[in-house]
Image: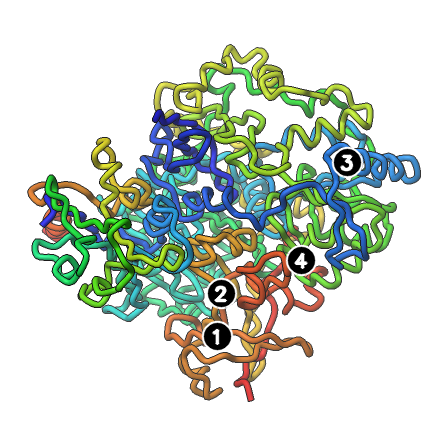
Amino acid sequence: MSKYYLFQDQKRCIGCMACVAACKSRQALPRGPFPSLVVAVGPRRVGNLPRTAYTFMPCFHCENPWCVAACPTGAMRPRTEDGIVTVDPDLCVGCKTCISACPWGAPQWNPETGKAVKCDYCYERVEAGLEPACVTVCPTKCLYFGTPDEIPEVRRERYARARAQDL
Amino acid sequence: MTTENVYTICGMCTVRCPMVAEVENSNIRFLRGNPNASGMKTSLCARGVAGKALINDNERIRHPMIRDGQRGEGKWRKVSWEEALDYTAEKLQKVVDQYGPRGVALSDRGGPFRDFHRAFLRGLGSPNYVNHDSSCARNVQHAAKSVSGAGRKEVAYDYRNAKHVILQMRNVFEAIGVQEVNDLTDAMNEGCRLTVIDIRANVSATKADRFFMVRPGTDYAFNLAVINELLTKDLYNKDFARKYIQDLEALKSFVKDYTPQWAEKETGVPAAQISSFVHQLAKDAPAVLWHPGWMMARYDTTFYLCRSIYIINALLGSYGAKGGLPFVNKPKDAGYSGLKKFMDLFEKPKEKRADGVGWRYTHFDEGPGLAHLLYEAMETGDPYPVKSYIAFRHDPLMAYPEPDRLRQIFDNLDLLVSVTFTWCDTAWYADVVLPLSPYLERDSVLAAKNAIQPYFFMRRRAVEPRFDTKACWEIFSGLARRLGINELAYDKIEDVWNFQLQGTGVSIEDFNETGMVKLTEGPVYKDRDNLKFGTKSGKFEIISQKLEDLGMPSLKPYESAQSPPEGSFRLTFGRCAQHTQGHTVNNPVLGELVPENVLWIHTDAAEKLHIENNETVNVSNNGYTEQIKAKVTDFIHPEAVFVLHGFGHKLPVESRAYGKGLADNKFMPGALKKWDPVGGAVALQENFVKVSKVK
């Protein structure tokens, strides 16, 4: 598993897709592939209020990535230094096996190159000390990038604050 | 490879967020927010991010063009800038010679970068500058003036320190201003409550603590009940009222019958909910921000709705308060002289305005006038002929109702010029198209932001223009030089900036580090014990003598909103976070995110019409029909249907937007003449459409 973790605080997310636009823009992708996507489900009635779930879906950079196991050419592989799963365009033959293998639809098809493309946590930005594109531009700062031991305690804190108001 | 950070200002919508362009080898590598501006962090919205796609788009206008065939036929001749500017200047001169300078009009979309082109019009001698605001926030502006004696921008919206934010006809989480969104989410994370009042559950409503789905057109009734409850239950801020509110007794007697029980019948919101909401407001006051609205060109009495919002803010003591609507500081409040204005180089034209503002209509602001009344003058020649029109970054054929009728009106013009960075219907109908460099490719005049912490800011071009396009100051310099307005003939942006900075003590270099020059150390809130209002009484006025003198009531009795006839629906429209009306629909990235609009229709109404979710349906009005996919939902009021504005493009040069979705402004017969006589804005949501199954 990659040593990094990307956490979405759904309560803050407004589904504005700035992350999605930044991702496509950074990778200069044509119409079609979405290496990250916010999927909005709703509005539904929750209690007396309309609620929409905005779920951010990048690549999870698994410990045991099925896309890597499925890739016949070795194009799809975790980077040794940090475990970020990337696809090497020179080795990718466009067989789409990774797209079939991933349970979450993370690898995407680039119709211009005829190869797979995916979220790579913007490792070049990360190596330069920056955050991934999606996290950088997020207008509500609902996305956090870091290591798993740094996952913000936002939910616990929010819950505690709400309880404190009731006391 | 070195990356250069260029501090500049976004131009994808009218918010104009401070941003940073990371540039490598003269190419834009990445765009992000400018963290030096309060509330920006590194954030940008999807539209801001898609600025790179705009630059790379080959479907934008690449060079100046002069029309060859009939207007709107789409036959163009590619010309040089020399020829385009010569042609435009000659035609303008001809109109000036024949009809006087008043025969020339110019419109834009408002904002901080107007000084240069407005000075051009003034230098020519014409009073006929208008902006888009009569299809936007004019009712808000005039409501603000009627109570406080000052415009709507005299106060800021202090989301970051608010305890309760109320959005009514204002959709912060979709019509995104990045600073507002960051500040509001931060405040909400610390317990700030959000209340949304709307005819449908927009994205803001999906984040709200309270959501009131009101019957369309009844917001004013809702607000009158809020005022009633505040006053009759003694929940208002008495210190503030005693000190600053003039004619409170008149208000008390006016609202006495507008109880929550009464409002329940009009709005559909249970009285008990209105009452408990008002009690919560009183607890959260004065850190309450009831937003007075942006796009309020909705109903023909929206002026009074805006006024009621200001009155509620005053009753809560949040008008002028931290966490509410604090007064902004201007450069001179911070000890700086303001930027020197090009406008001041010329005398204000003595000629009366063609739209009648200032003489026929004395209660309206003269500054940006009322565009729909300018168009009327173009049609009738009353008070005089207006024969040439420059639409600058403005697409009235998309922004105003009745585009076909507007085209007929434009047929009276000797010259129609479009200055634009994307294709739009007005450009397609123009005689000359002068392509503006997109914001990442152009420098703009310097601008000042009046705010709790005021600042000067600079839009600097990040990259050279890809195509044969120019910045606005270059275009209007070129025209000025040809028309003998030598004061505006500039060759270098630095000379433009240096002119503006005279006497400020600030230099161009001061913008290098962050793109802005802050004029105070930190936020400065004005002393609430010594507030001064710009009214005659110096107080917040419930009764406006100016309106009363004109026979217009300051407190207008509520008239019940019209329900649609059986089988019809009130047509409403709005925004999404991915588009800025029509001008982003063809953007390669944004057009992919939201390629078309859909028709929101209530589940019960759809059932009666046997319409399924996602089914293509007919929308008709007065014999005109278009088709669109239905979104069947419980979260819109049964009397209304809703679409995103800006779709239904029919220009062959926009391959991605062509034929996608429906254009709401084609379903508003007679609407150019339907406007709020007190607030001045057109009433765009007073139209009813029929929806039917496609047979």
Query: Circle 1 is placed at which residue position?
Result: B629
Identity, as a three-letter code, of the amino acid under mark 1: Lys
Q: Secondary structure at mark 3?
A: loop
Q: Earlier in the sequence, mark 3 or mark 1?
A: 3
Q: Nearer the viewer, mark 3 or mark 2?
A: 2
Mark sitting on residue A76: none
> In the image, B247: left or right of B384?
left
Q: Secondary structure at mark 4?
A: loop
- In the shown orientation, is residue B666 left or right of residue B306? right
* Residue name at image x 11 percent, y 52 percent: A163
- Alpha carbon distance from label 1 to label 2: 9 Å
Q: Is B418 left or right of B226, judged from the image as shown?
A: right
Q: Which residue is mark 3?
A: B127
Residue A149 to residue B443: above or below: below
Q: Which residue is mark 2?
A: B596
Amino acid marked by disc 2: Glu
On the question of residue B356 being in view, the answer is no
Q: CA distance from mark 2 to mark 4?
A: 29 Å
Question: Given this view, does label 1 or label 4 mark the residue nearer the observer?
Answer: 1
In percent of width and height, residue B324 lies at: 38, 40
- Residue on which disc 4 sits: B675
Identify which residue is drawn at 27% across, 68% down.
Answer: A48
Marks 2 and 4 on same chain: yes
Chain-order first, disc 1 or disc 2: 2
Q: Earlier in the sequence, mark 4 or mark 3?
A: 3
Give the x, y percent position of residue B384: 87, 45
Tell me the CA gap for discs 3 and 2.
39 Å
